[in-house]
Amino acid sequence: MTEQVSCRNQLIQGDAFSILSGFPDEIFDLGITSPPYNKQEKNNGRLVSKVIYADFKDKLPEEDYQSKQVEVLDEIYRVTKDGGSFFYNHKTRWVNGEMFHPMDWLRKTKWVIRQEIIWDRTIAGNIRGWRFWQVEERIYWLYKPVNDNKKGTELESKDAKMTSIWRAVPEAQNPHPAPFPIWLPARIILSLLPRKTEALVFDPYVGSGTTAVAAKLLGFDYVGIDISQEYLDYAKNRLVNCEDDREKIEKECRLHVVKKTSSQRKSERIYTPKVTKTADSLF
């Protein structure tokens, strides 16, 4: 496919849905993104300022926002290969006391929701007291089944040891108003693409280029889309100077190691002792 070849290792300026609509079916192996959250450009806390993007108004009626997210996610489903995955970073939000949860629209998409991961950012943006401090965001592992097999394939032991709660502070020293840290896409790429050297990773809201930089440093091709040329220029500079992030990537790589896989432990008859719970141990 000429479209697939020409878009490799490219950052494309434009609206995510419009650009994705021009791609052929099933060209991406793995996607990772964090879209704008529709924070209305007014909701800020004592510790962080309100989120305002360059070249984009994050200010839609909630119903329109959710409908557009479903449209984009279904288009991403089309361009993802069977058996491919898409990781979608979002959060619960409150507007005038009403909670909006990402599951409100994710269940309306074509994707199988394989897992909900909690990103514990360890800090709160707003410390006022209407509710307990919200320090977490969500990362949804969305899966495109093969032959209606919703379970998918098993993770390797070195990756499966990761828990469903990921703890680390947000990225700092980044001009983008809402970047995620580079270990996050690196962890996903390492876990999902351990041997697929020809795999293509993409981010439809690539922003400052974190997903693309992680993919490049781990030896994979990438495609990024963003409506802001300003952010894309910054992302391109990061890609040129990606070795600056090498140590952060290597730190994440060092977590993906086990001394013996489950199969090796079984073949060598190494078993984890069973723990018998007593009434006293429960308290």
Image (cartoon, rainbow, N blue to C red):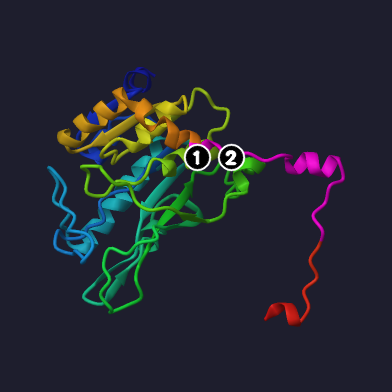
Looking at the rendering, in which quadrant would you find the C terminus?
Answer: bottom right
User: Residue tagged by mark 2?
Assistant: 256
In the rendered image, residue 167, in percent from the top left (x then y), is placed at 46, 55
Looking at the rendering, in which quadrant would you find the N terminus?
Answer: top left
Task: Please give the label number shown on residue 252.
Answer: 1
Nearer to us in this view, 20 or 184:
184
Stretch in magenta: 251-273
In the rendered image, residue 223, in percent from the top left (x then y), is placed at 34, 29
Nearer to us in this view, 271 or 38:
271
- Local crowd size for mark 1, using a 10 Å CA cut-off: few (<14), some (14–19), many (≥20): some
- Local crowd size for mark 2, using a 10 Å CA cut-off: few (<14), some (14–19), many (≥20): some
Confirm or deny contact between disc 1 and disc 2 (CB under 8 A): yes
Q: Is residue 255 magenta?
A: yes
The answer to whether residue 36 shows anywhere in this view is: yes
In the rendered image, residue 179, in percent from the top left (x then y), is placed at 29, 46
| Label 2 secondary element | loop
Looking at the image, residue 146 lies above or below residue 221 = below
